[in-house]
Amino acid sequence: MLLQQAAVLLQPHVPLEKEALLRRLETPPEPKLGDVAFPCFVLAKQLRRAPGAIAAELADAVNAADQGVRAEAAGGYVNLFFDSAVWLGRIVDAALEPGYGRSDEGRGRHVVIDMSSPNIAKPLGVGHLRSTMIGNALANLYRETGHAVTTVNHLGDWGTQFGKLIVAYRRWGGKAALEADPIGESLQLYVRFHEEAAEDPALEDEAREAFLRLEQGDEETAALWRFFVQASMKEFERVYARLGVSFDEVLGESFYNDKLEPVLERLRAQGLLAESDGALVVRLDEEGLPPCLILKKDGATIYPVRDLATAIYRKHVMNADRLLYVVGAEQQLHFRQVFGVLGKMGEPWTGDCEHVPFGLMTVEGKKMSTRRGKVVFLDEVLDEAVRRAREIIAAKSPDLPGADEVAEAVGIGAVVFGDLKNRRQLSVDFKLEEVVSFEGETGPYVQYTHARIASLLRKGGSLSEQQPLGKKGAHVPAEGIGMTDAAWVCAKRLTEWGAAVSEALRDNEPSAVARYLLELARDFNRFYHDGKVIQPGDESGTQARLRLSAAVGSLLGSGLELLGIAAPERM
Ligand code: ARG
């Protein structure tokens, strides 16, 4: 808003288009240099005048316009100082408008997001968890900016390992045990299979045969396979529910079984297949990549072919304009190869495919998973986070109604925020004590600030129970502010919301929103501690401060929601 206004004021006096001018405007590093600065050096050559002279003239023009903006020329810059008495109210009004900062830039574009995508009968690993949380935040961000979004859970529900599982289950398994603990029981069956197969290699043949029957559609085998898939899925769903995540589509790898042959056919017909050690590959020398393995010696198709069929399906059947794959950085080569082969197949849209990689996440130095191994169990991490949140809440607000629910929201929010606040490519190690703390760069800090504002508004009478904060309920005038510097800093931060969302979208980087929320919360808390918001006897000042608070609270609420984190009204 301030940048926009600065451009409006300067544009009649400079030989630049509005967009070009906007790009040149800067936010000065120190408040004493103003709210917006325009460097005049770029114009010096074109106008054949010294930057200082240009700056002086521009400053005069802005001051003459008398629009609540004072200009000073200094060192070749025009520094603009917005009169907070005029502009603070305008900013707050704008920020309280429904849909503030919401852009429509995705209108008419369909984005398909591949996220979570765990493997059946195996624990949900840390990569799947990060994929779930980052993918969920990205899906929200794309929706918020007008895109049509389809999230797809690309379950790993097919492969020779199911032959082994089926054999092991028939010999040593039981329905009740598998239903009670699908993933634990499956893991045990695998382990037993490998132990016994070491003694009795015939088991391997039996497993191959079982998988073959499955591929051929044998009903009894297929029923067993479906049972494994459903049992694991139930377990995954419990985790998803806890994290507050759902999917538009669950289309596992098996969904593409009948779509692989046409792809192979095409590769063959286009002469793209080459032999290498008895296997079939597509060479990607021109792309500077190692060959992409398509068909193994034993005729088994492998992972890349499924992803070729998947991408073609998403593009041509689901009508995706953009395909995002939120998958760990260790699969970088795989996706480069898949996109490379698609290009060779003459699919001209590979530029619309993007692998969105992320680094490893650990908790206190250990990998996290849904199953205990050399890893920490996700549920335990969440439980521990919730337990700590409950302790902090009990100490801070002993009489809080619905304290258990709030603790759940805060504990889980702490873990999710602890992940999302980091640039996704970084590896993250978090200490529970840190991420659950109500101080510092944490989810609970943002949540607590939001709840603090909700409480202020309740006390100030401008938030009824029917109109929750995030949905805006404050009706208070903006004038008569008597504002401090902290209030102005806070209001200016409100104007950066749209830029934070755009950055998050441009880079597929939810951390841009998380970091913005931390800054906004910090700015608000400075304002809050600067002087009382509610001051009996100063009605109009109180209303104005409440209104600023409401605008901040509303953005904190929307921001948390975008990240997939609950924003309780009381903490
Ligand atoms: N199931 C795979 C894994 O656990 C991830 C799948 C990612 N999505 C894809 N389209 N390849 O490694």
Image (cartoon, rainbow, N blue to C red):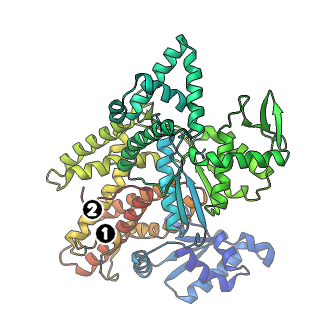
Q: Secondary structure at mark 2?
A: loop
Q: Is residue 436 above or below residue 72?
A: above
Residue 517, position as x, y percentages in the image: 43, 58
Q: Secondary structure at mark 1?
A: helix
Disc 1 residue type (three-letter): Leu
Disc 2 residue type (three-letter): Glu
Q: Residue at x 45, y 30 (%)?
A: 365
**Residue 469's mark?**
1
- Ligand 1 falls in which quarter? top right
Residue 30, position as x, y percentages in the image: 52, 62
Q: Which picture quadrant has residue 28?
A: bottom right
Q: Nearer the viewer, residue 199 or 346?
A: 199
Q: Nearer the viewer, residue 561 or 45?
A: 561
Which residue is the extreme one toward the bottom? 65
Label 2 sits on residue: 569
**Residue 132's mark?**
none
Q: Is residue 356 above or below residue 42?
A: above
Tally of marks: 2
Q: Residues within 10 Å of mark 1 (few under 14, many from 20)?
A: many
- Asked if the residue under mark 2 is in contact with the one under mark 1, i.e. CB atoms within 8 Å, the reply is yes
Mark earlier in primary sequence (1, 2): 1
Q: Residues within 10 Å of mark 2 (few under 14, many from 20)?
A: many
Q: Residue at x 36, y 68 (%)?
A: 554
Task: Give left or right: position of 197 versus 477.
Answer: right
Task: Give left or right: position of 233 versus 385.
Answer: right
Q: Is residue 128 above or below residue 462?
A: above
Q: Is residue 16 in sight in this rendering?
A: yes
